[in-house]
Amino acid sequence: MIFDRLFAKFLAAGVINTIVGSLVMFGCYHLLGFGYWFSSVCNYIAGGICSFLLNKYVTFQSRVISLVQIVLFAANLVLCYFISYGIARVAVAAILVQASATVQDTVALCSGMLLYTLLNYLGQRY
């Protein structure tokens, strides 16, 4: 079953990860004036480190660490990132045609985070 106690722990760790990553991403985009892709990448560098540590030690309670684990984790993050943010950017631009670029990007960043969360969980669990 996908939605079980493990999923609840993953979501709890994700709340912390999301707060860290969102502060970085929206700070980069709105305060520092960086673009969509750079801001979202900064999110996943900061959030990815937080996610790895929380999910490894808290959610999945793994004490083993290996280079293979780190490479697979990073590959999962990269794959989920490009799928999620690519789909979000295209879908939001098609739906919010009349909105400003800033509104489109902000909605796409939020939508991408949601899609990323689901894909990342599936990738880490399986």
Image (cartoon, rainbow, N blue to C red):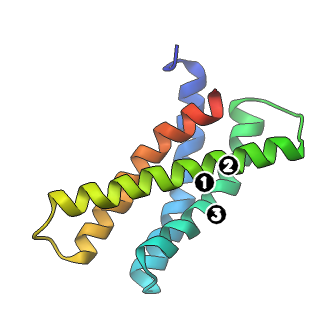
Q: Name the residue under label 2.
A: 75
Relative horizontal placement of residue 58, taking residue 91 as reference (left or right): right
Of marks 3 and 1, the one in the foreground? 1
**Up-down relation of residue 100 to residue 9 (above or below):** below
Q: Is mark 2 on a helix, strand or loop?
A: helix
Q: Nearer the viewer, residue 39 or 78?
A: 78
Q: Mark 3 is on which residue type?
A: Ala
Residue at which label 1 appears: 78
Q: Distance between the residues labelled 3 and 1?
A: 13 Å
- How packed mark 2 is, by other alpha carbons closer than 10 Å (few <14, some 14-19, many 20 or more), is few
Q: Distance between the residues labelled 2 and 1?
A: 5 Å
Residue extending furthest toward the left: 98
Q: Distance between the residues labelled 2 and 3?
A: 16 Å
Instruction: Tell me which corner region of the image, top left, top right, bottom left or bottom right, holds residue 100.
Output: bottom left
Q: What residue type is labelled 1?
A: Val
Image coordinates of residue 36 in percent, x first then y, are: 41, 73
Residue sticking out furthest to the bottom: 33
**Where is residue 97 drawn, in percent x and y?**
13, 66
- The mark nearer the N terminus, 3 or 1, is 3
Q: Name the residue under label 3.
A: 46
Q: Which of marks 2 and 3 is in front?
A: 2
The residue located at (78%, 29%) in the rendering is: 61
Q: Classify mark 3: helix, strand or loop.
A: helix
- Are the two marked residues, 2 and 1, in contact with CB atoms closer than 8 angstroms? yes
Say the numbered circle drawn on residue 51: none
Q: Is residue 92 above or below residue 40?
A: above
Task: Return the disc, 2 or 3, that comes first in the chain's sequence.
Answer: 3
Q: Which residue lies furthest to the top in this view?
A: 1
The image shows residue 68 at horizontal and vertical percentages of 84, 42
Q: How crowded is mark 1: few (under 14 residues within 10 Å), some or many (20 or more)?
A: some
